[in-house]
Image (cartoon, rainbow, N blue to C red):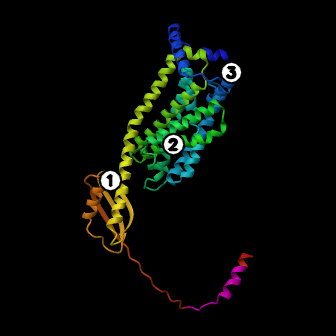
Amino acid sequence: MAESSSKIRSEGASSPGGSHAGGVIGDRWRRWGLGTGKMTPEERRTTLEQLYITPRGQEFRRYLLRFVVLLLASVLIAWCGIRADSTAVVIGAMLVAPLMEPILGIAGALVMNWRMRLLRSSLVLLMGGMITIAVAALLDLVIPHSLILPRELLARTHPTLLDLGVALGAGIAAGYAVAKRISAAAPGVAVAVALVPPLVATGILLAEQRFGLALNALLLFGTNLAAILLAVSLILLLSGFAPERAREKAGISVLASLTTTSLAVVAMSVPLAFYTDTLIERNTIRDAVIDSVNHWSRFSPQEIFNVRLQDELIIIDIAGDIRPRSTRSLAEEIASRVGHDVDLRVQWIQSESSQVHGRFRGERRALSRVLPRSFEYLH
């Protein structure tokens, strides 16, 4: 929405004491090179139109209708993609999802210290998140599906520091695309951000009463949200989105908002670091198990078709036509590779094969009598 210059100046005004303190912060920003980018009033007005919608009237109701319709469509697509274990379909849901709009609005309001716009954008985002979780849970309760949790669902229940890095990169790209008005970057940002799939995964897991996994999926969404807000806010600040006078008046408030967002990112990185360490350890154990089994079964070849880790227990499913030899040596070799004691369970499935010859006892027909009739159907 295009705003008048008087509106931009008036919103977020502070007291004289706050103005003096904000001026000090503004001087420090200029000294550090923050907010030194130049943005003309016309460019700022165009950026505002990308970040915000009309806050009242018929146009706002039309926006909410469009927002809800696109959100419901993206939830349905994401639910089907997750349940079908289809990455391509889940990516389609990311492209349709409209949740990036209120997040960009929140980032812009943080930089400009516009509290009412911050509240409106936050309420729209909160409404969208609650609708997404509720509709996903309802779909999972109503539509028949497999009881096995698909990989697309489980992939969103163990967020790591890599997900935080992706969210920060996506936030930088989103902020730069908004500041420089690069619309071509929007699809890539939407795919990288992945806002709807974690919320849909949360709804599915709540319906399945997997509350621990649902909390992990919600942690992934929170990580994406905090990292994107921080990155977009910093990029808008560096690009000169906030006029110098606004930075001087609201310097302390903006700095406090950015500090709070940074602390949220740091707080979420703690469990992410734990999950990352756990993932690395599990992958190390898995590789050690596979190498040990290959070495252990060199004299009686066995086929490994599954390796599972359940807490401290290693479960190996192998198949072969010869009974495997004692597994004690295998457990000792795995323990020597991973550097600690292990509990091992080997489940052997005996594979057998048979080959027989079936004799045809009816009238044998020549191939020349069959082909012409087939070609008749082709023509």
Image location (x, y in percent) of residue 356: 45, 84
Is residue 246 rendered to the left or right of residue 375?
Answer: left
**Residue 367 is inside the magenta segment:** yes
Residue identified by numbered label 1: 310
Q: Position of residue 300 (x, y in %)?
A: 33, 72
Q: Quadrant of the C terminus?
A: bottom right
The foreground one among 165 and 218 is 165
In the image, taking residue 56 as reference, residue 345 lies left or right, namely left
Indicate the amino acid at tag 3: Pro
Q: Position of residue 18 (x, y in %)?
A: 50, 11
- Above or below: residue 185 compared with residue 233: below
Mark 2 vs mark 1, CA separation in Å: 32 Å
**Residue 135: image tag:** 2
Q: Is residue 12 visible?
A: no
What amino acid is found at the position of numbered circle 2 in the picture?
Answer: Val
**Could you give the CA–CA distance between mark 2 and mark 3, rounded to whole angstroms?**
42 Å
In the picture, measured across the screen, residue 107 lies left or right of residue 182, that is left
Q: Is residue 330 left or right of residue 253?
A: left
User: In this view of the protein, which residue sits in the foreground, 299 or 151?
Assistant: 299
Query: Mainly helix, strand or loop, the magenta region?
Result: helix
Q: Position of residue 142 (x, y in %)?
A: 49, 50
Mark 2 surroundings: few (<14), some (14-19) or many (≥20) residues within 10 A: some
CA distance separating discs 1 and 3: 60 Å
Q: Which mark is residue 358?
A: none
Q: Residue at x 36, y 52 (%)?
A: 284
In the image, the segment drawn in magenta is 362-375
Query: Element type at marker 1?
Result: strand
Few, some or many C-alpha atoms within 10 Å of disc 3 (few <14, some 14-19, many ≥20)?
few
